[in-house]
Amino acid sequence: MADGRKSCLTGKGVTKVFGFGRTKTVAVDNVDFDFKEGEVISIVGESGSGKTTLAKMLLGLISVTEGDIYFQGEQRDISSHRKRKAYWTQIQAIFQDPFASYNIFNKIDSVLLDCIKMRGGGRLPYEQKVEMMTEACSFVNLKFAELTNKYPFELSGGQQQRLMIARIFLLKPKVLIADEPTSMIDACSRATILDMLMNLRNEVGMTPIFITHDIGLAYYVSDTVYIMEKGKFVESGSADSVILNPQQPYTKRLLNDVPKIYEEWDLSTV
Ligand SMILES: Nc1ncnc2c1ncn2[C@@H]1O[C@H](COP(=O)(O)OP(=O)(O)O)[C@@H](O)[C@H]1O
Ligand SMILES: [Mg+2]
């Protein structure tokens, strides 16, 4: 905390090993990080570099093989069911596959009611809950009244993505991990989703962590970028310094895949 900004999530030597012997995979290999409150963070790497595994450790969905994770400066404790539930009111995720977030047997209103309950609003009068759900839906351009009796799988892909964001609107976590949430949808709804996430960030003051293979997207949205290669962070820093002045061959290669995202168009040569 030397620079005065509060730490949100900190990791020291965080490692995840799957399997053993010949089938052993070191998915995340001794990474250190210090995500500050309020900054927009991106973790960028190719498929298989360990991004989702790291996200799952941050969320406490899988165990950490070695190393420590700190939340708001203190060693994270999710050793009991009650502590885990408390942690999940602070940190939430949206995934590439919206179904990962839903119990498919639950109708949309019960998905949203669960969020209100998680925030401690379980005993509020029903009319007030409807008001909250209506507000959350309108935030993402959905009409609650038209959704109440439906299941999430009855929605279009774009609507499912937006419903995930409505959940976050109700949950108001301190940290939101967005693991490639836009990679399944077209460019237009993608921009809308990003817009909504950034508005939500301002609305509830959360720290978003974008996980992506798209370094152009990372440049567009983030303050700080971590580049991940084969389970390791090979480079990190401000988006400008990492992307405009990459030091590592791997970062340069990722940038080569998306030429000219950051260069001014030179019209004189047209
Ligand atoms: N549950 C698991 N069991 C064994 N290996 C896994 C498991 N989950 C991920 N891996 C392996 O860990 C590595 C990193 O995967 P992942 O974190 O999904 O990468 P990314 O999200 O960057 O594509 C890959 O080699 C993957 O095969
Ligand atoms: Mg992944």
Image (spheres, helix red, strand yellow):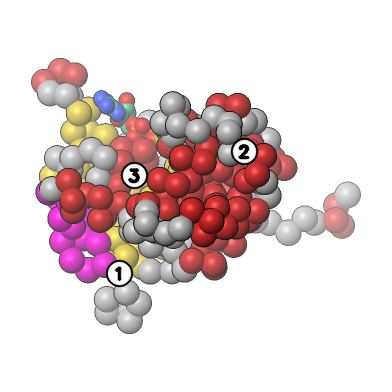
Q: Is residue 10 visible?
A: no
Q: Quadrant of residue 46?
A: top left
> Where ligand 2 lies, by quadrant?
top left
Density class for disc 3 (Cα within 10 Å; few <14, some 14-19, many ≥20) is: many
What residue appears at the point 35 percent right and 77 percent down from the top-left corner?
Answer: 5
In the image, residue 36 lies at what x, y percent?
36, 68
- For the residues marked 3 and 2, what is the alpha-carbon distance in whole angstroms? 30 Å
Q: Is residue 269 visible?
A: yes
What residue appears at the point 46 percent right and 40 percent down from the top-left corner?
Answer: 110
Does 165 appear above or below 201? above
Does 163 appear above or below 83? above
Mark 1 Cβ and ligand 1 under 8 Å apart: no
Does 128 appear above or below 50? below
State yes or no: residue 157 in magenta: no
Report the residue marked by disc 1: 7
Report the residue marked by disc 3: 55
In the image, residue 94 lies at what x, y percent?
46, 43
Report the residue marked by disc 2: 147
The mark lying in front, picked from 3 and 2, is 2
Lower position in the chain sequence, tag 1 or tag 2: 1
In the image, residue 10 lies at what x, y percent?
26, 61
Task: Provide the residue span drawn in magenta.
Answer: 67-79
Does 68 appear above or below 37? above
Q: Secondary structure at mark 1?
A: strand
The residue under label 1 is which amino acid type?
A: Ser
Left or right side of 147 for 69: left
Mark 3 Cβ and ligand 1 under 8 Å apart: yes
Which is more toward the observer, 214 or 124?
Answer: 124
Q: Secondary structure at mark 3?
A: helix
